[in-house]
Image (cartoon, helix red, strand yellow):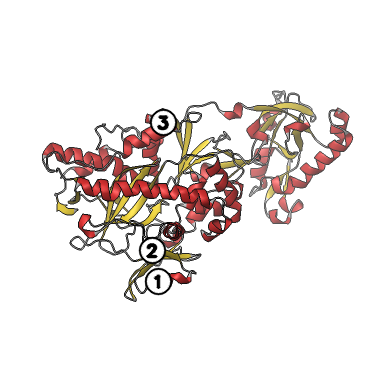
Amino acid sequence: MRSQTVTLVMLAGAGAAAFGLARIDPSQNEEDVLVYPNAEACIAGRIRTDADCREEYLTARASYPGAAPLYATMIDCEAHHGASHCLPGDGIVLSATGRFVPRMAGYVIGRRADQGLTPQPIFDHAPKSASAVSAGYSGGAGYCTGWGGRITTSSGGASSTARVASSAVRQVAYGGFGSTGRSFSSHGFSSHGSGG
Amino acid sequence: MRRVAIGERPDWRDTARRHGFTFHTLDGAAYWSESHAYAFTLAEIENDLEGPSAEIHALCLAFVGDAVEDERILASLDIPLHARDGIRASWKRGDPSLYGRLDFSYGGASAGPAKLLEYNADTPTALYESGVFQWLWLEEGLRTGMLPEAADQFNSLHEKLVARFRALRGDGALAFTAYADAPEDRGTVAYLEDCARQAGLATCFLDLADIGRDEDGRFVDRVHAPIPQLFKLYPWEWAFTDAFGEGLGATTTRFLEPPWKAILSNKGLLAHLHAREPGHPNLLPAFFEDDPRKASLGTSFVKKPLVSREGANILMVRDGAVLAQDHGPYGGGRHIRQALAELPDFEGRRPVIGSWIVGDEAAGLCIRESAVPITGNAALFVPHFIEPA
């Protein structure tokens, strides 16, 4: 009931996994952000109102215990965030007891309020920084968000502006699909997967 | 309809490997089986399967139109409250569907009309082997004389899928997702991805775990790029229960199958179709288990959970005695009771007819054959052909 020849490339030949979708990397979507060490620096910067500065700082500060990355050892933590930039986890939240977390170096907000960026804590990002800084190479300061988004400010000062990849400051959750099907795995979930 | 000994091609495994059909054997057990085949007359195909399939699919669409307007129907299908707006919206927008598979009990023209067992409208597999490998078997059988000259096959799946994708172009990109580590699912999705590419779409595959949700509630990939169109080989009822299930109503992502398919890929459909079309030759009497009218089925019936896969949790009773029972993981929730239509017996083998729908058209057949009354995932895929007149 048909005449057409079947031609396939995905299953035969190069294999299903060999094809990627070429497209523009959306990490090129950038936005302007402000980085401050604290509310006072924000107020001094005179971009936000005093009240906004205080409120946004408090929002970031409140999320710090949950946002800070956890490390098994002080050495691991300092390798990522720099010498003397880390502390024992139980100092900020009980659930981090026995782990090590970076100090909150400051916080990041959108350049404009209408960017709708949630204020969030940032951490010094300083792998091998000791040598780089001492050699005078670092033109701007390097920070990271709790999930590893990178922020490099335009000047060395702690209060600064930056243009960053959106993906560095906007968090995405993964793993929200699939768990219901996996929950059937103990009942013989097989190579047949979820089809029927 | 006959079951015919054909004899398998000595080199079919090589042929399968060449074509990327890697899941012909699953978990150590055979799945593709070509020692025999089922032969149909053209009249059996056209009058008993193709025609009724298109007609039942049309009845199903009419039912969806009513169901989205009726909370009682959605509740009867155990569709969670938080999922209903998304389902309703997808129907009202006219989100297109891609494919589905109606499963029938049918034993040939002399055995009476095909009886609908269920509609796998959301995540049917067996697609590649139906559309491609079965067709290659026919072509080779004709070439080598293994099959009678002028034998044909009810199979326009491949070109209908490509044509459907062509009509669904959207912005030209379509992502596909499934469990990357389930070979049958991965193979099915790779085949569909192939069809989409032939239709000119740019495609990519994402493991289910690679789908993210950003702060704006958009579904995104690993580089945070929004996913405008997503084919998912993952049942809606599972997605509704997952952590991202709450946000499905608000997302701008368009899905294949669309959320409204959750209304059809549900055994409760069978009770509703029977109520709407009592006496339809292809529909078995069926009732929800909490409906006293179920007593009219007497002592021979099949009890099925609203959602289950691969024949799981089905109880089959004949003359008051349990004929077969599957103890699977889907025992919770509501059930239906359907009149018993045992699969026909061909030399101890019991075939179930899968009748493919692509878009809104009947598009071909697949036959899965078991030694037991309930077709489970140990069933064999057996090819078919249409005998020359």
Residue at 14% x, 38% y is B150
Is label 2 in a helix, a strand or a loop? Answer: loop
The disc at residue A100 is none
Disc 2 from disc 1: Cα separation:
9 Å
Q: For label 1, count other residues whose C-alpha is less than 10 Å away and answer few (under 14), some (14-19) or many (20+).
A: few
Q: Nearer the viewer, mark 2 or mark 3?
A: 2
Q: Nearer the viewer, mark 1 or mark 3?
A: 1
Q: For label 3, count other residues whose C-alpha is less than 10 Å away and answer few (under 14), some (14-19) or many (20+).
A: some
Tell me if I can see residue B21 in this picture: no
Looking at the image, is mark 2 or mark 3 earlier in the sequence? 3
Expressed as whole percent of the image width and height from the top left, the position of residue B346 reads 19, 60
Tell me if I can see residue B53 in this picture: yes
Q: Residue under circle 2? A: B285
Expressed as whole percent of the image width and height from the top left, the position of residue B84 reads 58, 51
Dot 1 amino acid type: Ser
Asked which quadrant contains residue A134, the reply is: top right
Dot 3 amino acid type: Arg
Of the pair B3 and A185, the residue shown nearer to us: B3
Q: Are marks 1 and 3 on the same chain?
A: yes
Disc 2 from disc 3: Cα separation:
38 Å
Looking at the image, is mark 1 or mark 3 earlier in the sequence? 3
Single out the residue that lies furthest toward the bottom.
B320
Expressed as whole percent of the image width and height from the top left, the position of residue A142 reads 70, 31
Where B363 sits versus B80, above or below?
A: above
| Label 2 close to label 1 by CB (< 8 Å) | yes
Is label 1 in a helix, a strand or a loop? Answer: helix
Of the pair A187 and B75, the residue shown nearer to us: B75
Q: Quadrant of the C terminus of chain B?
A: top left
Q: Residue under circle 1? A: B296
User: Would residue A13 be found to the left or right of residue B238 on screen?
Assistant: left
Of the pair A60 and A9, the residue shown nearer to us: A9
